[in-house]
Amino acid sequence: MNKVILLGAAGQLGQLVAESVPNNIQLDCFSPKTLDITDHDAVKELIRQISPDLIINAAAYTAVDNAEKQKTLANAINADAVENIANSTPTETRIIHVSTDFVFSSKSRHPYKPVDQIAPVSVYGKSKADGEKALIRHHPENAIILRTSWLYSAKGKNFLTTMLRLMAERDELSIVNDQFGSPTSAHLLAKIIWRFALDYQGTGIYHWSDRGVITWYDFAMEIYSQARQLGILNNEVNIKAIEAKDYPTPAARPCYSALDSSATETLLGVKTSPWQEELYKVLKIIKENEK
Ligand SMILES: NC(=O)c1ccc[n+]([C@@H]2O[C@H](COP(=O)([O-])OP(=O)(O)OC[C@H]3O[C@@H](n4cnc5c(N)ncnc54)[C@H](OP(=O)(O)O)[C@@H]3O)[C@@H](O)[C@H]2O)c1
């Protein structure tokens, strides 16, 4: 395997996948500026021209709340475009498609396994679930669906960077403490994607998140504590725990969506690492970038 197409290369995860490309891979990167994945003919022609061994799809409509009002667009990007990619890809070409914990509802109180029943509670979650189904239906021989959750990284807009900004600006914050999930460093996830690309020729649904099940409040408290320890934050902030019902959002969110990554651990011979350790590594990158 040496020719890979990366879709969504300018996104949070896509940038890190591009940055961590192994030496022997010829990577062709595409962002909306160079390829709109909803342009079915353009996608089909690109796949025909490049004839890749693997397509990594990190492109998505990810604005969970806006999706409630932009259902058509969310479906076009997260479901219809994925179906077209699947239909345009020759059987022997592999696809690694990134999906989300938001395909689950809140019924479980144990981390979800890949085989568990999906039941999305938002337009975004449903559109991602439809993308998964399309891929399974139209490219069953050679597709990996890799679900992840609560993705964050050193750059761009995500929970970590938003918290650091708000914590620097305010002296009090209220954070939801009754939604449970697992944060995931996009830096480590990018490497896991390359492990799938290089070391696994099979198909199926897999999960990857960092280890631990916490609330957004727990996450915020740890960000605050580690950021102060590293000197990224100097001011004091009072962080209050609130219930989701007191922080209404347009899109419903599962109150429990932790993922069980054990099948991926076994398959690739890797271990998830505690979420606090991954957070520390990402905060160190932020600290380095400040210099
Ligand atoms: N972020 C999370 O917390 C989270 C959690 C679980 C799973 N995931 C999944 O992880 C994957 C990566 O997410 P992320 O955080 O990296 O999201 P992201 O930063 O929003 O990146 C998605 C990229 O897709 C691009 N894109 C959108 N519409 C497109 C189109 N029509 N054609 C081509 N590219 C298009 C976006 O471009 P523009 O920005 O220019 O629109 C963006 O660069 C997604 O599949 C997402 O569903 C994310």
Image: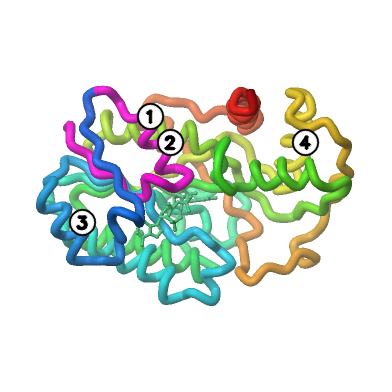
Query: Residue at 35% across / 51% down in the picture?
Result: 31
Q: Amino acid at mark 3?
A: His
Dot 4 or dot 3: first in sequence order is 3
Q: Position of residue 12 (x, y in %)?
A: 48, 44
Residue 201 counted in the magenta span:
no
Check contact, mark 4 vs mark 3: CB within 8 A.
no
Q: CA distance from mark 1 to mark 4?
A: 28 Å
Q: CA distance from mark 2 to mark 4?
A: 24 Å
Q: Which residue is mark 2?
A: 16
Q: Quadrant of the N terminus?
A: top left
Q: Which residue is mark 3?
A: 139
Closer-to-camera residue (248/106)? 248
Q: Position of residue 52 (x, y in %)?
A: 16, 43
Check contact, mark 1 vs mark 2: CB within 8 A.
yes
Q: Position of residue 98 (x, y in %)?
A: 39, 49
10 Å neighbourhood of mark 1: few (<14), some, or many (≥20)?
Answer: some
Q: Which residue is mark 4?
A: 224
Q: CA distance from mark 4 to mark 3?
A: 44 Å
The stretch of residues the image draws in magenta is 1-23
Residue 84 seen in the current view:
yes
Q: Secondary structure at mark 3?
A: loop
Q: CA distance from mark 1 to mark 2?
A: 6 Å
Residue 16 counted in the magenta span:
yes
Q: Amino acid at mark 2?
A: Leu
Query: Residue at 50% across / 38% down in the picture?
Result: 186
Q: Which residue is mark 1?
A: 20
10 Å neighbourhood of mark 4: few (<14), some, or many (≥20)?
Answer: many
Q: CA distance from mark 2 to mark 3?
A: 26 Å
Vertical placement of 175 versus 249: above or below? above
Viewer-side label of 4, 3: 4
Q: Amino acid at mark 1?
A: Ser
